[in-house]
Image: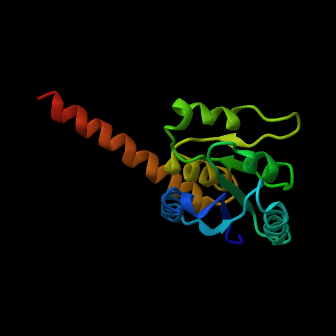
Amino acid sequence: MTTPLVIILMGSKADLEHCNKIAEACQQFGLETVLRIGSAHKTAEHALAILRQYEADPRPKVYITVAGRSNALSGFTDGSVSAPVIACPPPSDSFGGADVYSSLRMPSGVAPALVLEPVNAALLAAKIFGQYDASIREAVLGFQRKQAEKIIADDGEVNK
């Protein structure tokens, strides 16, 4: 199978640290990643050119969008591509955390998934690709086993 691609599209360089966490987690599942910057608000044509570039790539792909405050990037991306889109906005204390609401409701026909934790966004991408790629599916199952083993070990430690 062709190596799947995760395009991590951030609204600005301020989101880079959050995006690096997603990319590192994707790599644990054997997913190739690319980081790009394009704003739906400030550079719509540039963002659209990025999306067109990757839509022309025949590989299986998932887009993970990272934009805070007013998250138009996720809806803009989802409405412009045929591949799944996962919105993973960076954490924010602005507006008492209410800026996440811009990621919750999208117009009819626009359906990005919303995942707030960077590792979980990568996990969802891996689960999508794992439906068709056994090596990625095994990486997901291995990750889940490690998570379970840690809980059981922690339980044994506190229940002495």
Q: Which residue is the extreme one toward the left?
A: 160
Image-quadrant location for residue 101: top right
How many numbered badges does the structure rendering display? 0
Which residue is rendered at x = 82% and y = 70% of the image?
58
Q: Is residue 114 left or right of residue 157?
A: right
Image-quadrant location for residue 151: top left
104 or 12: which is nearer to us? 12
Q: Is residue 115 left or right of residue 105?
A: left
129 or 47: which is nearer to us? 47
Vertical position of residue 6 compared to residue 108: above or below: below
Which residue is rendered at x = 30% and y = 43% of the image?
150
Question: Residue 49 at x, y = what percent?
Answer: 84, 69
* Quadrant (top left, top right, bottom left, bottom right) of the N terminus: bottom right
122 or 143: which is nearer to us? 122
Question: Residue 22 at x, y = what percent?
Answer: 53, 57
Question: Residue 157 at x, y = what percent?
Answer: 16, 35
Which residue is rendered at x = 74% and y = 43% of the image?
112
* Quadrant (top left, top right, bottom left, bottom right) of the C terminus: top left
Colour setting = rainbow
Question: Residue 76 at x, y = what percent?
Answer: 81, 50
Q: Which residue is the extreme one toward the top?
A: 159
